[in-house]
Amino acid sequence: MPAREMVVVGCRLPQGLILHHPVDRSIQVKLEGPRLVVADGKKLSSSFATTEVDAEFWGLWKAAYAKNPVLLSHAIFEAKSQGEAAAKAKELQKEKTGFEQMPQTAAGISKANDVD
């Protein structure tokens, strides 16, 4: 039996995303998020993570959810290789997903002063 064709899917969402098959919802793929990247027991700081996904599943999901905000905002994106995924993620760094960390001074929050 020939090996199934796979694609690399990059995910910029902090906790990843679960994709359900558009026809058979019992079939799902978990996209890893950058906060889940672990090497030698330590979390790595990254702006994206990649997951290899069956090309047929990805094609069906992408066609069914073409107008989904995660695709339109490039929060998840397709690549042919790990290297291409890294290059695309670098290009997308300035594009917002809506899940970026807020600055500590946002919404009127200020740093507490030390009291003697």
Image (spheres, grey):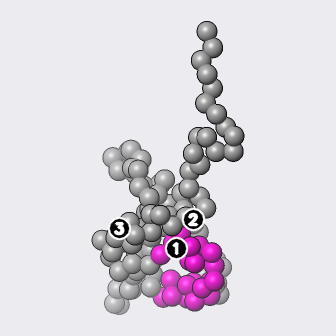
Residue at the disc numbered 3 = 86
Distance from disc 2 to disc 3, alpha carbons, whole Å, reads 17 Å
Q: Which residue lies furthest to the left in this view?
A: 83
Which comes before the other along the chain, label 1 or label 2? 1
Does residue 44 belong to the magenta stretch?
Answer: no
Residue 93 at x, y = what percent?
44, 63
Residue 110 at x, y = what percent?
64, 34
Q: Which of 69 and 18 is in front in this view?
A: 69
Which comes before the other along the chain, label 1 or label 3? 1
Q: Which residue lies furthest to the top in this view?
A: 116
Cβ atoms under marks 1 and 2 closer than 8 Å: yes
The amino acid type found where label 2 is placed reads: Thr
Camera sees residue 28: no
The amino acid type found where label 1 is placed reads: His
Residue at the disc numbered 2 = 97
Magenta extent: 56-77
Residue at the disc numbered 1 = 74
Q: Report the number of discs.
A: 3
The residue located at (44%, 78%) in the rendering is 78
The amino acid type found where label 3 is placed reads: Ala
The residue located at (63%, 83%) in the rendering is 67
Q: In this view, does 37 lie to the left or right of 58?
A: left
Q: Disc 2 vs disc 3: which is toward the camera? A: 2
The residue located at (50%, 60%) in the rendering is 33
Q: Is mark 3 on a helix, strand or loop?
A: helix
User: Does residue 61 sit above or below 110 in this rendering?
Assistant: below
Which comes before the other along the chain, label 2 or label 3? 3
Quadrant containing the N terminus is bottom left
